[in-house]
Image (tube, rainbow, N blue to C red):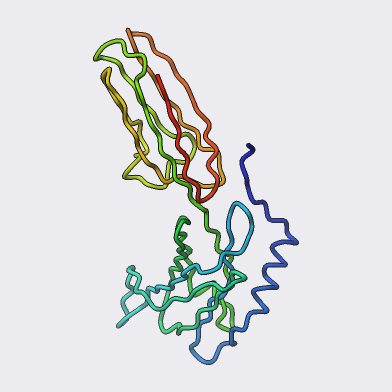
Amino acid sequence: MRRIFLGFSIISVLALLLILLETSCRKKINNDLIVSGIVIDTTTGAPIEGAVISISRSEISSGTYSSGYEFVTSANSDANGNFCIETEKNRSVSFLMTAFKDQYISNEVYFTSGDIDPYGNHLEIVMLSPVAFLNLRFKNTHPYNSSDFFSYGFGQESPVCADCCPPGPVVFTGNNVDQTISCTVFGNRTNIVYYKVVKNDVTHFFEDSIVCPAFSTIDHLIEY
């Protein structure tokens, strides 16, 4: 199965911007800041309903700039993926917008006061990547001795869950290995597992390509 990538044409982007401009957000009144946009699935291009969009800001207080971000407000994307958040600029220097939805990888977008137009509006197209769930079972079905060595790692992008599958190789030794590890990985993609096997001082390298549809649970057995 071919990897699925989303490539927006200039026409597509302009169409999305027109959608943003047609939302019901008010124009700036004095100190108002209006952040609007659309949330899109990176793999399908479909709008995402029910994503939580939160705004935090860093501002100048008593003449001193604070590099920390303080939560201000949040809103949910509608059935068309659109969102509109109204707040106040105050003396804010920079803003952090966070988008989150279950079974998607959260995304953070930073913008500054210089990115806000003269009317107090800021537009964003926010991309969220879906996840899938991969159960990897490693089994030494042809043991040689207790020095049998096995290590594995993911190609390209590491799984989302750093606690279950760290960026570096994971190692098993011994002749009685039968281990299952559950990982949260990128959905609608082919995840590649590279592994190394050493038995009787002979080394072999392998790779498995595992297609993981979004939101699915895949069981994959690696015997060595």
Which residue corresponds to the image point at 26% horizontal and 14% vertical from the top-left?
147
Answer with the quarter of the image where residue 201 lies. top left
Residue 57, given in percent of the width and then of the height, sits at 40, 74
**Location of residue 47 with respect to 3 vertically, above or below:** below
Residue furthest right in the image: 11
Q: Is residue 220 left or right of residue 20?
A: left
Quarter of the picture holding the C terminus: top left
Query: Is residue 96 shown above or below 190?
Result: below
Q: Nearer the viewer, residue 70 or 167?
A: 167
Q: Which residue shows up at 34% across the image and 74% down it? A: 70
> Which quadrant: the N terminus?
top right
Which residue is most to the left? 146
Q: Is residue 221 left or right of residue 116?
A: left
Residue 100 in percent (x, y) is at 45, 63
Q: Which residue lies at the image location 34% right of the left edge and 11% below the top edge?
A: 199
Give the answer, above or below, for where 140 lies relative to 216: above
Q: Measuring 52% from the left and 54% from the top, which residue is drawn there? A: 129
Closest to the observer: 182 or 169?
A: 182
